[in-house]
Amino acid sequence: MDAAAAPSRTVVVGGGPAGLACAIMLARRGWTNIEVWERLPRPPAPTAGEWGDPNRSYCIRISGRGQVALARLGCTERVLTYCKGVNGRMDWTPENPEGRQTLTQGRKYVSQVIQRDRLVACLLEEVEEKHAGAIQVMHGVACTNVEWLGGGGARLTREPTGRASGAHRVGELDTPKAAEDETDTQIETKDLDPRVLNPKSGEPAVVTVRVPFVVGAEGASLRNAVMSAMESDDSGACDTSMVRFDDANPRVYKTIPIHLPASFRTDLSYSARSKGGVALECLPTKEGLLVCGLNVKSTDKETLSKLESKASLRKYFDEDFPMFTEFISDEDLALMAERRMSTLPTFAYAGGGCLHRVVEAAEKEGPIGKQSEHGEDETTEDQVTSQARGEDEEEVGGACLLGDSIHTVKPYFGLGVDVALEDVTVLDDCLAHVAGGEGVRDGQRISRGGGWTDALPEFSRRRAADAKALVDISHGLDGGFLTFVLPIILDAMFHKMAPALFMPNTIQMLQKEDWTFSQVGKRKRRDRAVQVGIIATVLTCVGWALVATVRTLVSWLARSIVTGGGGIV
């Protein structure tokens, strides 16, 4: 799709990996006038020394799905420069206190680990070095209101968050979901991004702008304005309805760095589980240390009380995680004690089979104007000329959601950023699909010349079922022995016995970049049904064999008694 077919303006709300990747994808298609609005401050450059600080940002894993997406965006080389490859894992359990090392083999893509905010920094460099003329990223601003327009676009309200581009918080702010709980700090106006200020008064400005295309990429935050507006829309242009699961296994966590000695491999992820069910999950970094999350059940008050002081933490690690305690400094334990507990996101997906909003026909709403100092639209001189030519109709527009806005899962399975980046490539495919002249609306081919808005219902058709499948599968695994451990044991056993008939376990299947999540769900249901059938058959046969054995034994005993009794008589 060339630039002539693009909307006059695009706003991506959310400047995380999904939002920046989406902006890059659109720019590579020739689109211009793309804005990215991000609530949080700009992170340091990817080369900055701050990334050696384990409290700067949590780590994420980029597997095959994410690497395929980065390659399509032309970002692979830059991002992988700052990643650490992971070639296996080391696990300790109460049943195996000596630990077990498992190396990954035969995979096309080696999993890569990078700090989440460092990935953002890499994508920002891509924007500024390759797409500066097409993309403008604004930090420290939030979309606080969305009003849908007759043409399908929206009137967005943008407000400064009161946080400076250089004002970084470490620790809890850089953990998932923490932004929901943070209170914006008051800072001096001189420290704000100049683009969020009123050019006349120099004060922070609240502006309202009309936008033909809105992309909601704000993640799972409760402040997700675009998602909320789509969910509450009763015009018939959008059927999105968020499905949120009750958290049956709520967990909280704190992070801690571990400085491994030379005798430990730095290309492994590390995991340890205590007798009390507390998990310590660790990922390596480019700098050579492990960034670990100590995951505790929110109802485990006894363990939580041990995480409140340096002394109690030292004793806790000595007793429950002795394999790591000597590699944790007193300074890091003191920082961990001061850090508040962070909450893992709960499971949710965009239901209704709808990830987009479009209208069938555009209504006249007046011209799209520039933003005024009071936050209102003004008509420019060029637009007055357009009106004289009769070109004052509202521009046809639309909106869509991607990333954690449409599929939120707990980070146990390392799929968050992979799936978010994959969303962007699916949207790219949909734009390419309709660019040839034959568009798509609600799954039906129409002859509208392949306008970009026709790609949005196609995106829902291709991605909504996958978003639901991913969350359903992940939610099903979020339990104890019966829902998580036992299925993995069964999958491993049956796959080893009959690899041509049974696929690997569900977690491994989710990592396969050439399988959709819907396909994974369908195949694992089939595997599970066959496994249950086989087990039931075996148990039935064993049961019949036991019954037959008992009957034979009883008959033999009866005959022995009768025979013996006859002799006595």
Image (cartoon, grey):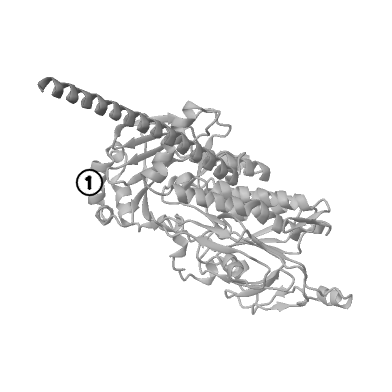
Residue 58 visible within the image:
no
Give the number of marks.
Answer: 1
- Which residue is pictured at 43% across the width and 38% down the height? 488
Q: Position of residue 342 (x, y in %)?
A: 39, 57
**Residue 54 vertical placement versus 350 (above, below):** above
User: Is 460 in front, or is 127?
Assistant: 460
On the rendered image, what quadrant is the C terminus found in? top left
- Which residue is pictured at 37% across the width and 31% down the height? 544
Q: Secondary structure at mark 1?
A: helix
Q: Position of residue 181 (x, y in %)?
A: 43, 65
Q: Position of residue 291 (x, y in %)?
A: 41, 44
- Seen as rendered, the residue at the extreme top is 567
Quadrant housing residue 513: top right
Using residue 365 as the reference point, say whether residue 82 is left or right of it: left
Residue 315 visible within the image:
yes
User: Is 82 in front, or is 29?
Assistant: 29
Quadrant housing residue 153: bottom right
User: Is 298 in front, or is 69?
Assistant: 298
- Which residue is pictured at 56% across the width and 53% down the height? 468
- Seen as rendered, the residue at the extreme left is 568
Using residue 569 as the reference point, say whether residue 285 is left or right of it: right
User: Is 273 in front, or is 559?
Assistant: 559
Quadrant housing residue 202: bottom right
The residue tagged 1 is 315
Q: Position of residue 247 (x, y in %)?
A: 41, 58
Q: Give the crowd class for mark 1: few <14, some 14-19, many >=20 residues within 10 Å.
A: some
The amino acid type found where label 1 is placed reads Lys
